[in-house]
Amino acid sequence: MLSNRGSGISRLGSLPTNGGCHSSKLRGRKSVGRAMTRRCRLTAIGLVLAVVPTGVWGQEETDSATDAVRIFEVARATSEIDIDGVLDEPAWQEAVVIPLLYEYFPGNNIPPPVETEGLVTFDDSWLYIAFRAHDPEPGRVRAHLMARDEIDTFVQDDHVTITLDTFNDERRAFQFRVNPLGVQADAIFSEVDGIEDYSWDMIWASAGKLTNEGYVVEVAFPFDQLRFQKTREAQTWGIELGRSYPRSSRHRITDSPRDRDRSCIICQFNKISGAGLRAWSPVAIWSSTRR
């Protein structure tokens, strides 16, 4: 656990520092790498999210895993976002909060011990996701600097997870983890064998900031690094927002319930949809690339 509280904003191919932007290095993507090391300012053309999530904080009971999948309809507005771990831009202020209402382990879809809020928006080039991870004892937040994808060490830290089923086929998904200092881990999750393949890497930006209320994580994914269907129709993707809260137990928290009697995980994800989601896929990156 780190005693000094502050922000972690990692740079291309480096550990988090006190400035700049964290984006992961991928050989063969030099133009994207140069753009992300040149500046952290990312332009968001805002958001309008039309969704009414179920449940409230402090509820005595959490609905069972038979709850219907929620669909978050995403449209565009105008604003600007800095990936710096501070959610002070109008785009974030306008966003509908997506609460993480379910602890699926060790509890079975019970109210979680801590509050977590997720936000989602995008522009023509980027998908943006942020978390406010509240903690009644912020001094106990576990956050360490480490190399990317050191997953055995990484999972001991507090962290958040974003899993995207960009084909909406419930077979495999991109998985991204970020700790409170902005350190990254990314993988491909296969529903067929249940394996998380951390040999896969993607270029993306992240920032984390420890606060007096817990921590904040802010992430940006370039659409040209994500594979999805080439179509003019509105995209619909599966999405799961998660949080790992390691204390006496490692509590695992999500925005949607998990039915332990079902063999599939991705099929239980919520959805994001909307005409503004990128409707083409120029780049396919499923192959393994290492640092």
Image (tube, rainbow, N blue to C red):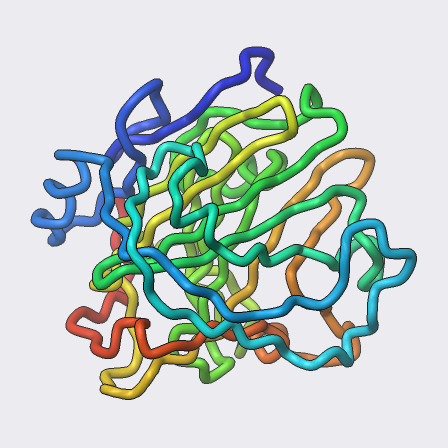
Residue at 8 percent across and 49 percent down: it is: 31
The quadrant in which residue 88 appears is top left
Q: Is residue 59 above or below residue 115?
A: below
Please give the count of numbered marks on the rendered protein.
0
Q: Position of residue 239 (x, y in %)?
A: 51, 68
Q: Where is residue 285 in the image (x, y as percent from the top left)?
A: 25, 66
Q: Which of 258 and 129 is in front in this view?
A: 129
Q: Which of 198 and 183 is in front in this view?
A: 183
Q: Which of 208 and 12 is in front in this view?
A: 208
The quadrant in which residue 120 appears is bottom left
Residue at 38 percent across and 40 percent down: it is: 89
User: Which part of the image, by quadrant, shows the C terminus?
Assistant: top left
Is 281 on the left or on the right of 9, as rendered?
A: left
Q: Where is residue 72 in the image (x, y as percent from the top left)?
A: 51, 71
Q: Position of residue 208 (x, y in %)?
A: 46, 33
Is 17 on the left or on the right of 215, as rendered?
A: left
Q: In this view, does 32 lie above or below 212?
A: below
